[in-house]
Amino acid sequence: MDVVTHSPEDHRRRELGAFLRSRRERLSPSD
């Protein structure tokens, strides 16, 4: 596993995507 190839930006982007998805799910009424 090369940590150098894995840029921190990619990790942050992934976290942001998950956060946005969670917020979108919360905003949209699933009822």
Image (cartoon, rainbow, N blue to C red):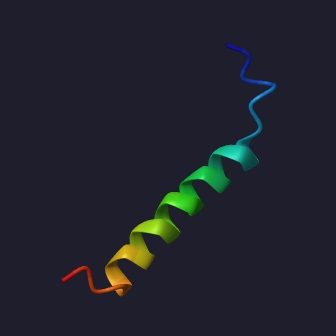
Residue at (37% x, 86% y) in the render: 27
Near-viewer residue (28 or 16): 28
Where residue 7 appears, x then y in whole percent? 77, 38
| The residue positioned farthest toward the left in the image shown | 31
Q: Quadrant of the C terminus?
A: bottom left
| The residue positioned farthest toward the top in the image shown | 1
Residue at (44% x, 77% y) in the render: 24
**Residue 3 as seen in the image, left or right of residue 30:** right
* 7 lies above or below 18: above
Residue 5 placement: quadrant: top right
* 14 lies above or below 8: below
Residue at (37% x, 74% y) in the render: 25
**Residue 16 as seen in the image, left or right of residue 27:** right
Where residue 2 appears, x then y in whole percent? 74, 16
Near-viewer residue (19 or 28): 28
* 28 lies above or below 8: below
Where residue 18 appears, x then y in whole percent? 49, 59
Residue 17 placement: quadrant: bottom right
**Residue 2 as seen in the image, left or right of residue 17:** right
**Residue 18 as seen in the image, left or right of residue 9:** left
* 3 lies above or below 28: above
Count every numbered label the image shows and give the total. 0
Residue at (80% x, 25% y) in the render: 4
Near-viewer residue (22 or 12): 22
